[in-house]
Image (cartoon, rainbow, N blue to C red):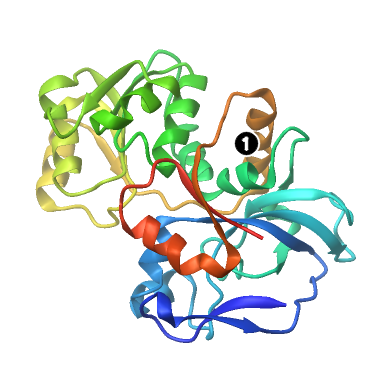
Amino acid sequence: MKAYLLSEAGGVENLILSEIEQPSPKVDEVLVEVKGISINPVDVKVRPVEEVLNLIVGSERPVILGWDIAGRVTAVGEDVTQFEPGDFVFGMVNFPGHGKCYAEYVAAPEAHLAKLPENISFEDAAATTLAALTALQVLQPRVKQGDRVLIHAGSGGVGHFAIQIAKHLGATVVATSSAKNRDFVMSLGADEHIDYREQKFEDVASGIDFVLDCMGGEVLLNSLKVLKDGGQVVSLPTMEFPEDVKVIAKQRNIDVSFVLVQSNGTDMNKLAGMLEAGVLKPHVSKTFAFEEIADAHAQIESGRTVGKVIVKL
């Protein structure tokens, strides 16, 4: 089969399309013929930096990047009970860890996958994986009916799912994006929009119970200003918080935390149900061929992606 091998961290030129042996599923795995792959910001962040690659993937080399797939089951391990050959499935595989998803076939743990709803394409299913799981795992335990929620970068991969999930949980949603993406953000269910280029969100938003920070830095610091005392903020880019953030958070009893998404088949099945019910609608802005992985990485690196980028096999 064909797969992209990364022998050492570096630029996209280090992703080498190679012919390698097709994997065999372990007892608790299924073999998936891949039809769609989602490319995430984490893909382009781990690729060039050895320390980050080691942190997320581990020391095994060469690496096959990628964690998000949709496809068809072609074989199952002897202990697998939920799937059989011919099933259409999707999921985020072995994250954090070595997902090995930039490949024509992927051996994936049964516990990381869900069946595709009949009304969902491979492309839309592949899109509703790491980014959607992140939004679900962040919001589900923290947001309740009636909360005011601020979602930064509402037109991005995580953001556009987060708006829809927060609305599904009964929240009033305030979202930031550029003016050109206002209509898109509002179409997802946002109640209020803030153009981050023309307005300082900290001067406009108030009475916020929960903030999803997809930016870090000054955005995180200023997010504390709009939160109620006792509110919560999750910062996806920030693993270690600056001292000024910690001081303010302690003074105002604000919970500041970092969340790293985890592969979880139960949560994937929740997403499948939301897709089937039309509660969740992924937005795929660009689709690339398998041979165009480098172009897909360049699109993510531009920082201007609306919704999701998909590679189609």
Residue drawn where x is 45% and y is 69% of the image: 294
User: What x and y, as percent, mark residue 139?
Assistant: 45, 33
* Residue nearer the viewer, 251 or 269: 269
> Looking at the rendering, in which quadrant would you find the N terminus?
bottom right
Hey, what amino acid is under mark 1? Answer: Leu
> Looking at the rendering, in which quadrant would you find the C terminus?
bottom right
Q: Is residue 73 above or below residue 259?
A: below
Instruction: Indicate left or right for 241 with 123 as reference.
Output: left
Instruction: Indicate left or right for 268 with 40 as reference.
Output: right
User: What x and y, as percent, mark residue 264?
Assistant: 62, 49
User: What x and y, as percent, mark residue 305?
Assistant: 37, 47
Q: Is residue 253 above or below residue 148?
A: below
User: What x and y, as percent, mark residue 193?
Assistant: 27, 22
Residue drawn where x is 68% and y is 47% of the image: 122
- Residue 116 in view (yes/no): yes
Where does label 1 land, which residue? Answer: 271
Q: Is residue 247 above or below residue 190?
A: below
- Element under disc 1: helix
